[in-house]
Structure formats: structure tokens, C-alpha cells
């Protein structure tokens, strides 16, 4: 049994959905558990709907909804022109569910509402794919991840209840494979003990694939993408990227931890624990080899990898009473940061100051100032970039730091990280 994950780009239009079916047909002797994301950029549009709901911007809310509706209808019309097909009613039902969100009393927790709304992108997407597969007589079944992936109540970042989830997956998916070859379910979403919907964090569909593979003891997982595999740098910043043929779980976890956005970082642990290889392959060229992530570390050192994080802000905190930065105030600083759910990309301390690097678009600087100004002097430096190089040498360092001023640098044997800004 195999697990396949198809992301938003792989189902962004009717021809893309047809291509997904063709990929499935390349594996006629296999049972495939298939995880599908929301189509194209639907999740972003749904996020904007939630924001419009919260700011009571009714016009924007309805504009976004109309866009989402038309976008999906357009795809369905091309795949299944018969408008009496039940898929049209299924889409209308979801649209009505979204319409009703504007008039109902909002839950006090915005994250709760976010999950109830944003999750519907995956629901519509999988319904369309399943309806199309049925049309072309691919033996498949739609399955609701809101009955499979059980999480806690941390909306927008549900933590998986592994015991119950594994049980659900085994009880529901394994018997289904007696009568169908493909099970189609939603990535990214789960449910709480009360049956409310949760999400697993942006880009969480990869993680769902990892969870399914772990629970089903799959032979492998393939993430189908619009790139030929895992590259040693984002082609946005480098024009001579190299594909990594084979790397270890450890290396892939390090790369995704530092910000390589090819795979959701949580995906790899369940696969590593069961020794299930993960392939990253191109949905445009499905027979090409792609990248395989597996146990052996023999190939990790071959090619240096570069990870860029732009728009960083470096904040330094200095205790006003001139006390040293030691365990006590470190724990105080971390407690405060946890309160605003700050995600630290890099940190460093000296005797009197503690510096942290954060994504500028994920924090509010004035909140940050307010949070610390009672006991700390807060200074910041923005417009920075963070570069991480795995398996670096001097030539690679020179290449990325040309015309840059380095504000901070951290080095281990395998990894160098530099916080830089453009030289004046
Ligand atoms: N649709 C979700 C997102 O865009 C989950 C995913 O695609 O992995 O973040």
C-alpha cells in the first residue's frame, strides 16, 4: 500500500485533476491512500474570508466566497459537464455552509472559527476529485478526515491523538481497500472529541500523509510537487539549483527545521520511526526519479544546501536593572514569548542581552515592546535575512554574503547561519 499526497498546485485546474488521475493509473496493482489539499490558493482565500468575518467586512466576505464558488464550479464544469451530477449539490451545500457563517454568532475563539471555515477547502477539493474518479471508473472512495485524524483542542495547530487516530485509520481505510483501489481523504484537517473540526497548521497535508503511512504501515509515501524533487536551494533565490537524489531523514528534518519549505517538518518523524521512505516527485514528470528521503546518511554531505528566510527582525532584550542574562530571566523571557506564540528562528545571548530573530510578518512589534518594556530595554533591527547553509565551505559562504553585512553568525561543523542585511 502506498500513500500519495497531492498539494494545491497539483489540483489547481481541471487538467491538473486529470493529470492526478493519470498518475494514479500508473500504479494499477497498488492500493493507494491519497491525501489531497485545497485546490490552488483556496486556503489563502478562505483565510481572508475569516479575516473579513472578524472585521465585519461583509462585502469582502461575499466577494471571496463568490470567487471560491466560481473557481470550483469552473473546474467541475470541465470535468463533469452534467449539471445534474450530485457534485454540484455537494458544492452548493458547502457554499451555503459558508454563507451561514456570516450571520451566526461568532465563537469567542477566532482560531475555532478559522478551522471550521478554512477546512472546507480540503472538503470541496476531495469531493471534486472523488466525483471525477468515479466518472472515469477509478475504483475509489471518499473518506472524511474529520473521522480519522483525532486531535486535541488547539485550533489551527491541532496535536494528534496517535492512539485513536491509528485505530480510526486502520478500522476505516483497511477494510475499504477490499472493495476499492484508492481512498481519497483531506490533508490538513482533523476533529476534536466533540466532533469539531481542527487544522494541523498551514501546509499540514504532508503531515496527514505521514500519519496515514505510519498507521497503515505503508510501503512508501510520495509527495507530488511542481518541482523535480528536493532542491539544494529555492529556485527563487538561486538559478543553478541541484536536485538532492537521496538524503537521510535526519538531513531532511534539519533542512525543513531551518525553513526549507518542501516538506512540512512534522511529516518526517512518523516515517522515520517506521522506516518508511518518502519520495518527493514531480507531478509534471511522474516517471522521473525525484528525491528519496530514507534512513542512510551516506549521501547527505555531497551537496551544500541553502535556506533563505527573508523579512526577519532581530530583537535584543537587555534587563533594565543591569542583571545578567542567566537562567532566571531566560525563563521569564521564554514565558513571555510563549504568551504571544512567538516562533524563534535563531537566538543568542551575551552577558547583558538576549537576541532573538523572528519572522517580521508573524509578530507585532508594538505588542512585543509592550510585553517586555516593564523590565527590559528592547531594541530591534528589521529588514534582515537569515541564511542557513548545510555542509558549507568558504566558497558557499562568500557566495551568499557578497555585498552583505553580517550582523550575527552561528557555526557548527555542519551548519552555518548568518543574519545579514544589504551593505549600504
Ligand atoms: N491547504 C492547506 C494550506 O494551504 C494545507 C496544505 O496544503 O498542506 O496550507
Image: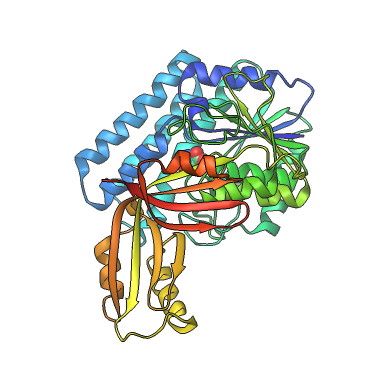
Q: Classify residue 324 by image quadrant.
A: bottom left
Q: Residue at x 43, y 69 (%)?
A: 338
Q: Residue at x 46, y 84 (%)?
A: 328
The answer to whether residue 163 of the structure is visible from this angle is yes
* Viewer-side residue, 106 vs 227: 227
Q: With 114 as the anchor, is 410 left or right in this view?
A: right
- The percent coordinates of residue 203 (x first, y second) are 50, 43
The answer to whether residue 119 of the structure is visible from this angle is no
* Viewer-side residue, 221 vs 53: 221
- The percent coordinates of residue 217 (x first, y second) are 78, 44
* Viewer-side residue, 196 vs 419: 419
Q: How many circles with numbers are drawn on the protein?
A: 0
91, above or below 363, in the image: above
Is the image coloured rainbow, by chain, by secondary structure, or in one colour? rainbow
Quarter of the image where the N terminus is located: top right
Q: With 159 as the anchor, is 181 left or right in this view?
A: right
- The percent coordinates of residue 410 (x first, y second) are 50, 58
Q: Residue at x 45, y 52 (%)?
A: 418
- The percent coordinates of residue 250 (x first, y second) are 68, 50
422, above or below 16, in the image: below
374, above or below 387, in the image: below
Q: Residue at x 74, y 37 (%)?
A: 220
Amino acid at each position: 500500500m502506498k500513500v500519495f499526497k497531492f498539494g494545491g498546485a497539483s489540483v489547481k485546474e481541471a487538467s491538473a485533476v486529470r493529470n492526478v488521475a493519470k498518475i494514479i493509473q500508473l500504479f494499477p496493482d497498488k492500493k493507494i491512500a491519497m491525501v489531497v489539499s485545497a485546490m490552488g490558493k483556496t486556503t489563502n482565500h478562505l483565510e481572508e474570508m475569516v479575516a473579513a468575518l472578524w472585521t465585519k467586512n461583509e462585502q469582502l466576505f461575499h466577494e471571496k466566497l463568490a470567487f471560491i464558488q466560481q473557481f470550483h464550479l469552473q473546474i467541475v464544469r470541465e470535468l463533469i459537464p452534467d449539471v445534474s451530477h450530485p457534485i454540484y449539490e455537494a458544492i452548493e451545500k458547502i457554499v451555503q455552509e459558508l454563507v451561514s457563517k456570516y450571520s451566526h454568532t461568532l465563537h469567542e475563539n477566532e482560531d475555532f472559527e478559522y478551522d471550521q471555515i478554512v477546512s472546507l477547502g480540503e472538503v470541496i477539493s476531495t469531493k471534486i476529485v472523488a466525483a471525477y474518479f468515479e466518472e472515469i471508473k477509478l475504483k475509489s472512495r471518499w473518506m472524511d478526515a474529520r473521522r480519522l485524524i483525532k486531535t486535541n483542542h488547539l485550533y489551527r495547530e491541532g496535536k494528534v491523538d496517535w492512539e485513536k487516530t491509528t485505530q480510526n485509520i486502520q478500522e476505516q481505510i483497511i477494510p475499504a481497500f477490499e472493495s476499492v483501489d484508492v481512498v481519497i481523504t483531506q490533508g490538513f484537517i482533523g476533529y476534536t472529541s466533540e466532533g469539531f473540526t481542527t487544522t494541523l497548521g498551514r501546509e499540514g497535508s504532508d503531515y496527514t500523509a505521514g500519519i496515514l503511512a505510519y498507521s497503515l504501515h505503508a510501503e512508501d509515501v510520495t509527495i507530488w510537487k511542481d518541482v523535480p524533487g528536493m532542491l539544494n536551494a529555492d529556485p527563487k533565490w538561486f538559478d543553478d539549483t541541484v536536485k538532492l537524489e537521496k538524503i537521510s531523514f535526519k538531513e531532511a528534518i534539519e533542512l525543513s527545521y531551518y525553513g526549507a519549505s518542501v516538506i512540512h517538518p512534522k511529516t518526517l518523524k512518523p516515517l522515520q520511526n517506521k522506516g518508511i521512505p518518502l519520495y518527493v516527485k514531480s507531478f509534471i514528470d511522474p516517471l522521473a526519479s525525484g528525491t528519496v528521503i530514507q534512513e542512510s546518511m551516506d549521501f547527505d554531505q555531497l551537496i551544500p544546501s541553502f535556506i533563505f528566510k527573508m523579512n526577519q527582525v532581530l530583537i535584543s532584550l537587555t534587563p533594565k536593572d543591569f542583571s545578567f542574562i542567566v537562567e532566571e530571566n531566560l525563563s521569564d523571557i521564554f514565558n513571555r514569548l510563549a504568551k504571544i506564540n512567538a516562533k524563534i528562528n535563531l537566538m543568542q545571548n551575551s552577558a547583558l542581552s538576549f537576541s532573538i530573530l523572528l519572522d517580521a510578518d508573524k509578530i507585532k512589534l508594538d505588542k512585543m515592546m509592550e510585553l517586555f518594556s516593564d523590565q527590559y530595554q528592547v531594541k530591534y533591527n528589521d529588514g534582515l535575512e537569515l541564511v542557513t547553509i548545510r555542509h558549507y565551505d568558504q566558497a558557499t559562504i562568500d557566495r551568499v554574503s557578497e555585498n552583505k553585512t553580517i550582523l550575527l553568525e552561528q557555526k557548527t561543523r555542519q551548519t552555518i547561519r548568518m543574519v545579514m542585511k544589504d551593505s549600504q
